[in-house]
Amino acid sequence: MSAGGCSSSITVGGEGSAATATGGQPQRVPFSYEVFPARSSAAALALGHTVQHLAASGPEFISVTYGANGSSRDASLDLLKYIKQHTEARPLAHLTSIGSSKAEIEQLVADFWQAGVYDFLALRGDPPRGVSEADVELGEVPNTVEFVDLIQSILKRQSGATGRVCIAAFPNKHPRSETINDDINVLLAKQDAGAAFAITQLFFHADDYLRFVDAASRAGVRIPILPGLMPVSTSAQLLKVAELAGEQAPDDLLARLEAAGGYGPECGVEHTVGLASRLVSEGAPGIHLYTFNRHQSVLAVLRELGLLTNHPFEKELA
């Protein structure tokens, strides 16, 4: 045990144990990752190393974020090209519609398609820095339902591959929604517009996801909803990401991180393993891991879940 009370070695079960979601034969649990463009040349080198490790684990896809109002367009496209050209992983591009014309979006999707990127996460996006929600210019595509519909219409005109559009979901309510039911109605509309699956905003409590998915299912949502999880490493990081997600940081995890002096990656891994284990056992269709551009903790989560086998860099990860 560490000074903070977190296990440095977590036993969840044998190989494939977490894949037994319904008590039947073990099956592979799909997993995926999110990364963001590096902000310096040194960070870019480290990110390339991380992407190689992530890709070697066999994810369903690796998604790349997109800055507010397209501020990281070129950097995002470069990273997506790197994933496509230097790994076997399937790249998925985040796209935002805020402040954009339909012509600009069509050109952007076409550019990504030409680079071999066929999957997209459709987001409205946040206002540019310094611009309030009241003053934001939404552009010609004012909401994500129309955005999904637009991307789908663009993809149907492409040839040579099949593209997918996915969307975001919010287990604890979108900050601009009044009720969870409002969010579910929007989710239904996005599904009708052609969304293939959804990825949730970061959350820390299994019941939040399970309640949301149950309510969505009863309302008619049929697309898979992937839970978005992040193994935090420090108490400061936990507080920051919880604030950004509009979530309450778990008291027990925060206490263990602080007892470990504020730094305890094993605490974040242990919490995420427990969370993922329960979600998968209760029917989650996979797990999506927010990496914060680091591979060690997310791969440790997969290893403890019995999902990381025959990784070519296993000795380096041990």
Image (cartoon, rainbow, N blue to C red):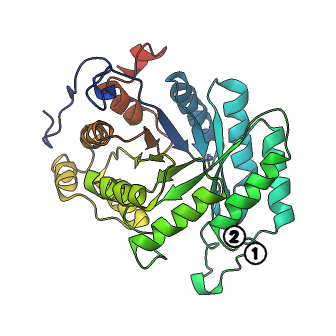
Residue for point 42% across, 71% down = 181
Please give left or right for residue 296 compared with residue 95 in the image.
left
What label sits on residue 269 in the rendered view? none
The residue singled out by tag 1 in the image is 139
Q: Nearer the viewer, residue 158 or 25?
A: 25
Task: Point out residue 146 in the picture as x, y percentages from the top left corner.
Answer: 70, 66
Please give left or right for residue 198 compared with residue 86 in the image.
left
The amino acid on which the numbered mark 1 sits, given as a three-letter code, is Gly
Outermost residue toward the bottom in this view: 134
Q: Nearer the viewer, residue 6 or 12?
A: 12
Residue for point 64% across, 42% down = 92
Q: Is residue 166 above or below residue 247?
A: above
Task: Point out residue 48 in the picture as x, y percentages from the top left corner.
Answer: 61, 32
Label 2: which secondary element: loop
The amino acid on which the numbered mark 2 sits, given as a three-letter code, is Ile
Badge 1 crowding class, 10 Å Cα cut-off, few under 14, some 14 to 19, many 20 or more, is few
Residue for point 65% across, 37% down = 91
Q: Separation of disc 2 and disc 1 at Cα?
A: 6 Å
Please give left or right for residue 99 compared with residue 172 in the image.
right
Quarter that holds the N terminus: top left
Task: Point out residue 39 in the picture as x, y percentages from the top left corner.
Answer: 62, 50
Q: Is residue 69 above or below residue 295?
A: below
Q: Quick check: marks 2 and 1 in contact, CB under 8 Å?
A: yes
Q: Quadrant of residue 303?
A: top left
Badge 2 crowding class, 10 Å Cα cut-off, few under 14, some 14 to 19, many 20 or more, is many
Task: Point out residue 222 in the picture as x, y percentages from the top left corner.
Answer: 49, 50
Q: Is residue 300 above or below residue 124?
A: above
- Among numbered discs 2 and 1, the one appearing first in the sequence: 2
Label 1: which secondary element: loop
The residue singled out by tag 2 in the image is 98
Residue for point 73% across, 70% down = 141
Q: Nearer the viewer, residue 194 or 179?
A: 194
